[in-house]
Image: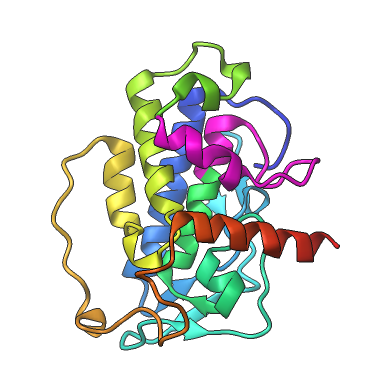
């Protein structure tokens, strides 16, 4: 999916839904929870009929049902797609993939790469446009007006929720699918293994961790990676 070809909007939406359904299967329907850890445009293969297939499970992790999250070292993955709790603390769970999927949605919306040739982060560029719901400014100019406005709003909404800087505030992939399809969202309950337990083990104070702090950390991390 990492080619420069301009996909029609309808194809992009179908790719988004297909990948979302694949991640939902990995997170919820497998015998054991699978965290992919490297959801990127280059790891989404398209068939001749533009059906998406998630590939490259080299960094994938199995998580036991009773584990809230897992801490890994060294931190591996593709810069531009890594969630803040992962690139700062090595913490992974399903929400790690949700964040990366949000970046993938931004690529489908904008036609831009996660990190462009000028080393600008797509997340940093897109966040203010998502907050203003500025469709004209964020939509891939190659699409012109050839997209469904309601679908664009839904994909933008899903992307904005997925790239939230606090993992607990990101939706599950089940909810993401409902947003993308425009379905009525059901009230979700937390798995028993997660009830009453914090996501982080005191590594960061979620109450004080703001979007501004996240963007600052992302810029700092980006500078270290690019040096």
Q: Which residues are magenta?
A: 105-132
Measuring from the top left, give residue 213's x and y in whole percent.
52, 61
Q: Quadrant of residue 22?
A: bottom left
Residue 50 visible at all: no
* Most distant residue in the top direction: 145
| Quadrant in which the N terminus appears | top right
Q: Is residue 90 left or right of residue 174?
A: right
Tell me if residue 20 comes above or below residue 94 in the rendering: above
Tell me if residue 67 comes above or below residue 206 in the rendering: below
Residue drawn at x 59%, y 46% is 124
Residue drawn at x 45%, y 78% is 204
Measuring from the top left, give residue 57's x and y in whole percent.
61, 69
Measuring from the top left, give residue 184's x and y in whole percent.
16, 41
Residue 107 within the magenta-colored segment of the rendering: yes
Q: Quadrant of residue 144?
A: top right
Q: Quadrant of residue 205?
A: bottom left
């Amino acid at each position: 999916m990492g080619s420069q070809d301009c996909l029609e909007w309808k194809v992009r939406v179908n790719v988004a839904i297909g990948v979302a359904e694949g991640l939902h299967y990995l997170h919820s329907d497998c015998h054991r929870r699978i965290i992919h850890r490297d959801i990127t445009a280059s790891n989404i293969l398209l068939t001749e009929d533009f059906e998406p297939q998630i590939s490259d499970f080299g960094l994938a992790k199995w998580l036991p049902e009773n584990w809230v999250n897992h801490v890994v070292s060294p931190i591996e993955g593709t810069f531009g797609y890594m969630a803040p709790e992962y690139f700062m603390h090595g913490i992974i769970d399903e929400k790690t993939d949700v964040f990366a999927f949000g970046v993938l949605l931004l690529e489908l919306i904008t036609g831009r790469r996660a990190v462009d040739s000028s080393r600008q982060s797509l997340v940093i560029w897109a966040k203010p446009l998502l907050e203003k719901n500025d469709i004209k400014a964020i939509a891939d100019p190659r699409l012109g007006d050839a997209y469904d406005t309601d679908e664009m709003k839904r994909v933008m909404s899903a992307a904005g929720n997925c790239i939230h800087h606090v993992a607990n505030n990101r939706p599950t992939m089940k909810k993401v699918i409902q947003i993308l399809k425009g379905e009525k969202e059901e009230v979700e309950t937390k798995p028993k293994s997660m009830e009453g337990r914090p996501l982080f083990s005191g590594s960061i104070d979620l109450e004080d961790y703001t979007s501004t702090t996240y963007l600052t950390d992302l810029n700092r991390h980006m500078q270290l990676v690019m040096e």
